[in-house]
Image: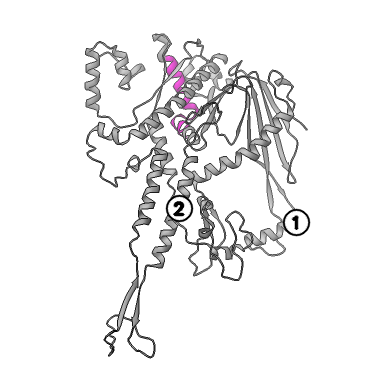
Amino acid sequence: MAYTLEQFADVPLDEPLLRHLLDEHERAELPRLNLLWSYYRNHMETVGRARRGWSAKPYRLAQERGLPGRLAWLSGGGGAPAPSSLAAPGDVPLDDRAAWRRELVIENDIAWRIHAMIDFMFGKPLRFAARDADAPRRALVERVLEAAWEASGGVALLQDLALLGHVYGHVDLLVRADPAAAIDHHDDPVAAARAGSARVEVVEPTRGVALLSGRDFRSLDAYIVRSQREGNAVSDAPASPVAAWVSRWLHGHAADATPRSQRERVRVTEVLSARYRQLYEERLVRGEWAGPVLIDESENTVSPGRVPVVHIQNVSQPFRYAGLGEVEPLIPLQDELNTRLTDRASRVTLQSFKMFLAKGLGAAGPLAVGPGQVWTTENPDAQVLPFGGDSAAPGEEIHIDEVRQALDKASAVPPLASGVLSTKIGNLTSENALRVTLQGMLSRTSRKRVCYGRGLAEAGGLLLAALDAAGVFRTTRDERRIEVVWPDPLPRDARTELDAARLKLELGLPAPRVLEELGYSGPDAGVI
């Protein structure tokens, strides 16, 4: 079986190019994206069962891959060679591998910074405003658009969007239409939008592959969505000798272990262009993917004339499709921090117990050491010298502190953003003082809001265009020009806001605009 792409003759997409794009994405791009996600997530992976009485942990964390080899494994001892890296631990049995592992200290300083950035971006509900719509229609357009976003996921979708964008550097929004969902709501466009007649789907870079235009890298000729899912069929797979040995190695099964059943896996490939859409399925048969089978195709009714995909960069990168993420620049600093924290933990462990050196006591045998023990000697030069114990290491502490400060500067997220007050930061009783302290993070948030705001506004226009094409809610091109109204990320004093609004009214600003700035719009807006 093969891809039948005759319907995409308007764009330079044929089967060899499609297979090349998918293969290049899987071979070159996916490993880098998975590395970024693993450093953010720092997920736990089991490595065997620790034996009784051993302090080794039966798991390892994703960020351990960034530690140097001297910390990942002990050297020598045990009668077996120590593995050279965590990536190839197969030379040591799983139960013995726990004995080789060092006691590592992993502190994930990336995840809480990403979460703080997302809280500043989408911690409060934002609003979509139809700036070019006439006054009688503006409120209805905004209500329909808000219902469509809520049907797509609302604030949860926006937070997922921000998380993927911060980790990977960019993310895509795919607009879909479902006219059948609005059959019973033709007279109520808000209810039709709430029923999901047009919705937005987040496509992470691990699934989305873009075919950029040869004339303009900012526009798309086609877009491919590749994903895998588990089917509902289960088959019994005969256990080969190699599979049986692996099963015994991993799970300790008997030599005549019964065959394990396997669940069917399905790989889905969706190809989108400005005028057409195709959906293919491939099934995993005996360890190999069968040829693609076309299961659905249709014309592009969401946005005829353009691919229904909106691309959002986390931070703009000139002349590149991919944007700048927040995880990549923090990885080297995170590895250095984990290395120094592990070194400090080892030093503290080795120096935790104070010892004594006896000189000149003249004892023929071992000396008893205990509370109330007295030693006597006739040698006036005899000494008992204490050594060991946890001694101060100012250079070590300064270095760890400087690494943390480098993480603060690289991410523009100080510990204050998460509520940690560790140093003297002055008087924060005023709003202006707090803004000055968080100036770096506020500036970075404002810069990212330009990219996210443009993408969200474009996606809102596509939602209205999809509703218009489905006959659910008719709108003009001007009414589909959307603007995102962002809330202030910092808490503001209500009395100060009301005093500022009163001064604006005295200066002659329109009352609806003042109410809108206060957060009142639509049916909630009255007359001051």
Does residue 258 appear in the picture of this structure? Answer: no
Q: In this view, which residue lies farthest toward the right? A: 1
Instruction: Tell me the mark number nearer the camera, choosing from 1 and 2.
Output: 2
Characterize the local packing of mark 2: few (<14), some (14-19) or many (20 or more) Cα atoms within 10 angstroms: many
Task: Give the SS element for disc 1.
Answer: loop
Left or right, 383 with respect to 454, comes to: left
| Residue 371, horizontal then vertical, whole percent | 29, 80
Task: Give the SS element for disc 2.
Answer: helix
Check if residue 267 falls in the magenta segment: no
| Residue 412, horizontal then vertical, whole percent | 39, 37
Residue 186 higher or lower than 327, as above or below: above
Residue at 50% in and 33% down: 324
* Rendering quarter of residue 208: top right
From the image, tell me which residue sits under label 1: 240
Residue at 58% in and 56% down: 85
Image quadrant occupied by the N terminus: top right
Residue at 68% in and 36% down: 23
From the image, tell me which residue sits under label 2: 338
Magenta extent: 140-159
